[in-house]
Image (spheres, rainbow, N blue to C red):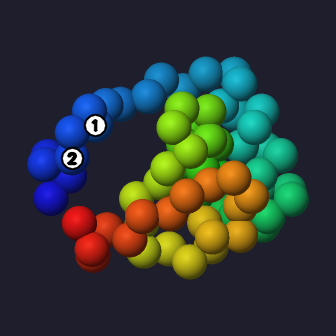
Amino acid sequence: MFKNIPKLEEAPLTSDTILNAIRIRVNYGLTYFDSLHASTALLYDGVVISVDEDYKRVQGLKVVDSKKL
């Protein structure tokens, strides 16, 4: 499924990603890994592909339902 997404790339884990993830975890109560995924998405294109409803709480983050791809 994910192989068919154009321009899909891996994003590096940077200090900006980690610091933003901490802010997201504190402000939105996401888990450690969810906060890293949300942070990475926000720092790149603002889109996360997931069925996890928790991402919808994060301001500025667009959630694409993976079941609809």
Give x and y (percent) for residue 16.
71, 24
Tell me the residue at 77%/33% (across/down): 19
Give x and y (percent) for residue 40.
56, 38
Give x and y (percent) for residue 62.
55, 58
- Residue 46 occupies which quadrant of the picture? top right
* 62 or 48, nearer to the observer: 62
Instruction: Check disc 2 and give the amino acid type.
Output: Ile
* Label 2 neighbour load within 10 Å: few <14, some 14-19, many 20+: few
Quarter placement of the N terminus: bottom left
- Residue 65 occupies which quadrant of the picture? bottom left
Residue 53 seen by the camera: yes
Give x and y (percent) for residue 31.
66, 62
Residue position marked by numbered label 1 in the rendering: 8
Say which element carries label 1: loop
* 67 or 28, nearer to the observer: 67
- Give the vertical position of 48 relative to 11 (above or below): below
Instruction: Check disc 1 and give the amino acid type.
Output: Leu
* For the residues bearing labels 2 and 1, Cβ distance under 8 angstroms: yes
Left or right relative to 28: residue 30: left
Residue position marked by numbered label 2 in the rendering: 5
